[in-house]
Amino acid sequence: MPGSGRAPAALSGDSSPSVTLQARSRPGVTVASRSGAVTTVAAMTDGDRVRPPWWLKATNEVMMIVSRLGVAYGKEGPAVLTVPGRKSGVPRATPVTPMTVDGTWYVVAGFPGADWVENVRAAGEVTLTRGRRVERLRLAELPPDQARPILRAFPAQVPTGVRVMKRCGLITEGGPDELEAQAGRFVVFRLEPA
């Protein structure tokens, strides 16, 4: 995993079958769990999308520079997730903060309707970069019931992300109960080896 010098056990020694995200045209997106259960999550409409504040793009640029330098802060540091644009095919980069729950790595997308989420749904595979370490990974989207415990852990593991969500008006308090209630609105991806 980025910055650790080794892949986490969930990426290197996990013997469960690999599951990839299966994208479907409107009205929903099909996601699969490790057990093979398939769930359709309602796709975002333009009314569901949250427009990021004007300052977020500049903040993201700074975070990507920090990540490329390999600087970490807090429990986890930022990483740069790069995925081909679903329409253009041009690589698109966004900063993310991977977190670990029970030995498995996850990424939370706090902005409903974020372009990078739609790009991941279309591509399935991404590049995750921190410093000089680059990894090809699959991102498997979790259905809301599986996302809840990950979202509960998010405030303790990624407090910077919670502060950004609060500043953007996506949440008010930022506690585990409030984040858990966002399952289905905030997308959670499990990181798997490509």
Image (cartoon, rainbow, N blue to C red):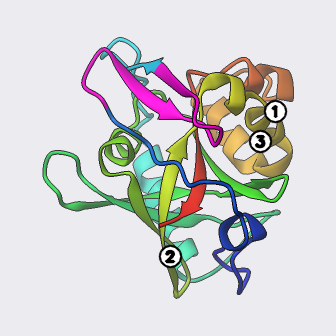
Q: Which residue is mark 2?
A: 135
Horizontal side of residue 105 vs 63, given as left or right: right
Helix, strand or loop under label 3:
helix
The amino acid sitting under disc 3 is Phe
Comes first in the chain, label 2 or label 3: 2
Q: Residues within 10 Å of mark 1 (few under 14, many from 20)?
A: many
Q: Nearer the viewer, residue 161 or 179?
A: 179
Task: Residue at 56%, 73% (x, y): give it.
Answer: 67
Q: Nearer the viewer, mark 2 or mark 3?
A: 2
Q: Is residue 39 above or below residue 61?
A: above
Mark seen at residue 152: 1
Left or right: residue 179 compared with residue 124: right
| Contact between labelled residues 1 and 2, with CB atoms less than 8 Å apart | no
Could you tell me which secondary element the residue under label 1 belongs to? helix
For this rendering, which residue is in front, 31 or 114? 31
Stretch of the chain drawn in magenta? 24-40
Is 116 drawn above or below residue 167 in the view shown?
below
Tell me if label 3 and label 1 are in contact, CB under 8 Å.
yes
- The residue carrying mark 3 is 154
Tell me which corner region of the image, top left, top right, bottom left or bottom right, holds residue 44: top left
